[in-house]
Amino acid sequence: MTTYDKSLRSVVSDDLLVALRAEFALGAAKHDEEASFPFENFARLAEHGLIALTVPRDLGRLGGKITDAVRLVAAVGAGDASTGLLVAMNCLMHHVLSRTRPAGYDEIASAAVQGSGVLNALQAEPDLGSVVRGGLPGSYVTRKADGGWILNGRKAYATGSPIVQWWLALVRTEEPQPRVGTVIVPANSPGLTVVPTWNHAGLRATASHEIEFANVHLVENAATGFYAPGTKEAIDRRATVDVWSCLLTAALYDGIARSGRDWLRRFLSERVPSNLGAPLATVPRLQGVVGEIETLLMINRSLIDDYARAAEAAPLPDAISAQMVKHIVTKNAIKSLELALSISGNHGLDKANPLERHYRDALCGRVHAPQSDTILVNAGRTSLSSEQTLG
């Protein structure tokens, strides 16, 4: 079971999360093998209003907080990792827009309440890579005479490209001193083309293709604000995104690892080698490995629960702590699955069983920004700065 501490405020029942996890798990292997998008999973989420989990109550929905989003992502991701990734991103993007309420968000929120309105961000680019490592995005907007914008460029890793209705694209302005910001781009905009490039080892059903913008015309209020790189406004915006992104990413990969753990427990309990005459679960050496896995997952759950509660209550975002949670949890998730593979032999690597898929999916946790090297530098710099201040 991947739902979290019941003391967390909940707007979604545990029974529903358990049912969705089991249902989504049934089709996960087929979607992984075919790299096909799980439309049916999003139809089910829409039936329960969960596309709009983080849409505010005054706009007609649940008004879910980060603790609610963590529970949903963990359960969905445990069933089907690819679905869980887009659910995490959708929860995050609706939260971001609901904080600032840009013009046009009411329409987006209404679509989500009606069961569509899936959102995602576009930040990475084929040439630049991840923007969190520095550099200006190559995608840019030009001001139109009527006050609107013209968007050109190319974005990578457009998770959910078959179903996302609005993209939040990170762009720069065409100015002598470029500013950076986000524009909201309807997915059906003329000049927007999905370029099928996704052929990945893990999260194969996410359809994280590239998107090309060729003279895409946007209305004036498509822009949610532009800032000079490195300014306080830009840093504050990034901090809020980091808290939600890192904690939801952690919940996703912890959910994946728990699915692998669950399969391993069943396998060890049911497998009775003829030379042993008893289930593998009775072998002390294997019990010790399972104990190590349980320890790693206990650490994960404690960190996610504690920091989700803290983030919900905090007056200011603590991005550094959230980044460290993401680093530790994803590392532990991968380690727990490696341990499971180490004692399941050929069975664990057989595509007839889900463990090798869970491992491939978990490896993707290493590449989500911010990556571990960046996180550790940020944590160290913050710690040393605090020491200098105290001194």
Image: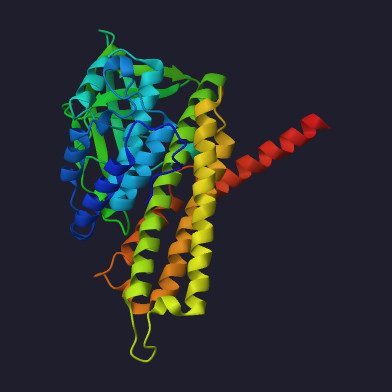
The answer to whether any part of residue 384 appears in the image is yes
> Residue 246: x percent and y percent?
47, 40
Left or right of 60? Residue 179 is right
Rendered image quadrant of residue 153: top left
Left or right of 218? Residue 333 is right
The residue most toward the right is: 391
Q: Nearer the viewer, residue 149 or 174?
A: 149
The residue most toward the bottom is: 275
Task: Write the residue at 23% across / 40% down.
Answer: 161
> Residue 154: x percent and y percent?
30, 36
Q: Nearer the viewer, residue 44 or 85?
A: 44
Task: Write the residue at 34% across / 68% down.
Answer: 266
Depicted 236 relative to depicted 365: above or below: above
> Residue 359: x percent and y percent?
38, 62
Rendered image quadrant of residue 100: top left
> Residue 6: x percent and y percent?
44, 39
Task: Write the residue at 19% across / 55% down.
Answer: 27
